[in-house]
Image: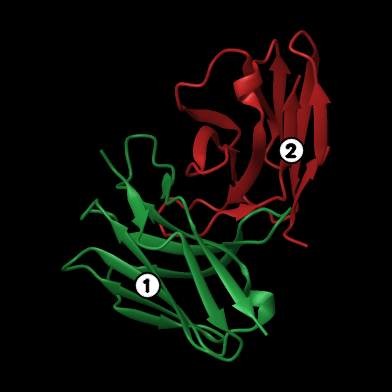
Amino acid sequence: GESVGLHLPTLSVQEGDNSIINCAYSNSASDYFIWYKQESGKGPQFIIDIRSNMDKRQGQRVTVLLNKTVKHLSLQIAATQPGDSAVYFCAEKTPRGNTGFQKLVFGTGTRLLVSP
Amino acid sequence: ETGVTQTPRHLVMGMTNKKSLKCEQHLGHNAMYWYKQSAKKPLELMFVYNFKEQTENNSVPSRFSPECPNSSHLFLHLHTLQPEDSALYLCASSQLTRGGSNQPQHFGDGTRLSIL
């Protein structure tokens, strides 16, 4: 079945380091991917997205890379700060079915711990 | 402020109680979703409403009953729940276009539900 997985359940970094969070997806027909950040007591917060016709997309301090050959997605956070500590989820949008709605498949998440 | 507001934030109820969760989105979106988030499990899609019409029921037990009176409000009516239903219930919204463009879902902060 469809699945989205994360290679590392916990990533610990020092403040100022660059962080890389990885994600593997299984559906080669997925055409849209999203990274979310979830802080304790809050809902998932949209960080950045990328369409399958792109390999790279940059935001403020974040970059998402998409490698469709190996079905791999990564989130790079530059100059990681303590406020970046959270659980990060990747999600893929499965091919649109008859209903036409956007169904996202989520991974279990990677916890990022940033120490001062 | 995510633009998606959920109430209550916390709810404790007995198995024989009836309660409702409420979600309101202020983003002008036309699709709304209910998700269940349990510990160490990926987000599970429960229901989807597209233009106020329910387009997906992801094999959810009948003790969960959604209601979408308009495109800005979504309810989840709860009745005779089980202890395993204890979880964080998240509401999300997104903008669906006829052309099928990809837009991210935006989440509320959830209702933490505990079944005694």
Q: Is residue B42 above or below residue A110?
A: above
Circles 1 and 2: CB atoms closer than 8 Å? no
Question: How far from the left and from the top, in percent, is residue A13?
Answer: 53, 80
In-image side of A27 versus A40 (left or right) = left
Is B91 displayed left or right of A56 in the figure? right
What residue is shown at x 67% (from left), y 61% (from top)?
Answer: A39
Same chain, labels 1 and 2: no
Quote the CA–CA distance across marks 1 and 2.
30 Å
User: Where does the image place residue A95, in percent across and percent down from the top left?
Assistant: 29, 47
Q: Chain of mark 2?
A: B
Q: Could you tell me residue B56's position as x and y percent? A: 47, 29
Quadrant of image for the C terminus of chain B? top right
Say which amino acid is labelled 1.
Ser
Give the quarter of the image for residue A91: bottom left
When the figure is inspected, residue B81 is found, relative to residue B4, above or below; the finding is above
Judging from the image, mark 1 belongs to the subunit labelled A
Q: Which residue is mark 1?
A: A74
Q: How many numbered circles does the render carry? A: 2
Mark sitting on residue B74: none
Task: Please report the residue visible at 29 percent of the width from the left and 56 percent of the height from the top.
Answer: A25
| Chain with red colouring | B
Quarter of the image containing the N terminus of chain B? bottom right
| Residue lying furthest left | A69
The image's colour scheme reads by chain
SS under mark 1? strand
Q: Residues within 10 Å of mark 2 (few under 14, many from 20)?
A: some
From the image, state the color of chain A.
green
Q: Which residue is found at the position 73% from the left and 31% from the top?
A: B113
> Percent from the top left, x then y, of residue B69?
72, 29
Query: Which residue is under mark 2?
Result: B112
Please tell me how crowded label 1 is: few (under 14), some (14-19), or many (20+) other residues with Cα within 10 Å.
Answer: some
